[in-house]
Amino acid sequence: MPRADVAPRPAQLPQAKLSGAALRLVDPWGAAIPDLEWKVFADDIAAITQLKKQKNAIILAHNYQTPEIFHGVADIVGDSLTLARAAAEVKAERIVMAGVHFMAETAKILNPTKKVLIPDLRAGCSLAESITVADMRLLRQKYPGVPIVTYVNTSAAIKAESDICCTSANAKKIVESLGVAQVIMVPDEYLAQNVARETKVKIIAWRGHCEVHERFTASEITDLRHSHAGLVVLAHPECPPDVVMASDFAGSTAAMIDYVEQKQPARVVLLTECSMSDNVALAAAQRGQATEFIRPCNLCPHMKRISLAGIRTCLERDLYEVTVAAELLAPARQAIDRMLAA
Ligand code: 13P
Ligand code: SF4
């Protein structure tokens, strides 16, 4: 029973104030979240659910968002590709991106007439920061005629200098779709190297890294396997190549979720951002799946700038609006559209 000074958990709140996702999570959350924390979440979830209706807003949330956002208030959740596809089809007037800035920019490029909001403008990305427009132009000069495949984890200005975008879910397909012997792939060096092992296309890589995934090591996998018999290791392709090679499976965040759901491993570790395991473990518990999740934790400080309180303020005050310079809209959109059509 909740204490008298604590807000009720979702099942005890008026249903009209809650999203279906929050209601579905009553049982797993009951065990996972202390009452004190729940009081804050419950107030914010109820307010956000009402604000979404009032403001005709939709919340897109990346798989790295914390469970109270991912399961509690998001309308669409997924990997970067899912969010880009969803952004292209949004009907609501406002899009709130519970993710990082490049994701909000992608939503704006695909919906220039809609208001795109991000709860914290400082939610950046080490990959997006790793390359400039001047770098892109130098690459064009150095490798004339070689197409540039750009990971979506980049600014609108970089996308606008690109031939086509890709995500970790479709990188190999996009590289091969161009029908050329050689491509430049920016900015993630490890993603490029991991794709290069699987294709005959020669890949010229940039030297950007994800500050979360570059920290995983192959020796960490060896240690984990020793201490957890039968462990299945899933790695994100932003991890260094030796980490991916030491893993049992590599794929985007959505591909990892599918793997856990379909293969139902007895013990699994997801070598990616911490909140993924929390979200996937909650969903698995809801399905009655007995998978044990081993959780080494590498946090993305940028993703973690997004909070329920921030989303609530964002909806209440229409803050912070993400804009893209008019001259970048068409060329950046072309690179994204080519990816979505490939
Ligand atoms: P995906 O969700 O597309 O796999 O991307 C991971 C990531 O790091 C996004 O910032
Ligand atoms: Fe960028 Fe890595 Fe954070 Fe994703 S996890 S937003 S790639 S720094």
Image (tube, grey):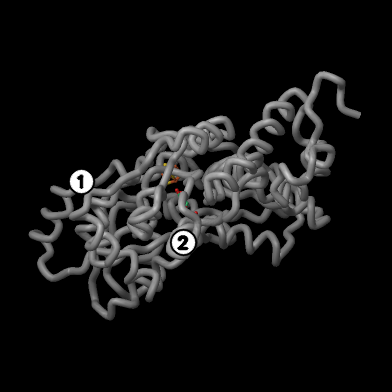
Residue bearing the label numbered 1: 132
Residue 190 visible to an observer of this rendering: no
Front-lying residue, 334 or 203: 334
Give the amino acid type for the residue marked by disc 2 in the picture. Answer: Leu
Residue 19 x %, y %: 69, 48
Q: Secondary structure at mark 2?
A: helix
Q: Secondary structure at mark 1?
A: loop
Q: Badge 2: few (under 14), some or many (20 or more) residues near its Cα, within 10 Å? A: many
> Relative to 330, is 123 on the left or the right?
right
Front-lying residue, 135 or 224: 135
- Total numbered labels placed on residues in the image: 2
Give the amino acid type for the residue marked by disc 1 in the picture. Answer: Thr
Circles 1 and 2: CB atoms closer than 8 Å: no
Residue bearing the label numbered 2: 81
**Residue at 32% across, 50% down:** 154
Q: Quadrant of residue 172?
A: bottom left
Front-lying residue, 324 or 227: 324
**Residue at 68% across, 52% down:** 268
Q: Is residue 35 above or below residue 224?
A: above
Residue 112 visible to an observer of this rendering: yes
Q: Nearer the viewer, mark 1 or mark 2?
A: 2
**Residue at 38% across, 43% down:** 101
Q: CA distance from mark 1 to mark 2?
A: 23 Å
Q: Quadrant of the N terminus?
A: top right
**Residue at 28% across, 56% down:** 186
The residue at the far bottom in this view is 179
> What number is the disc on residue 179?
none
Q: Is residue 312 above or below residue 162?
A: above
Q: Quadrant of the C terminus?
A: bottom left
Q: Is residue 66 above or below residue 231?
A: above
Is the shortest distance between ligand 1 and the CB of mark 2 under 8 Å? yes
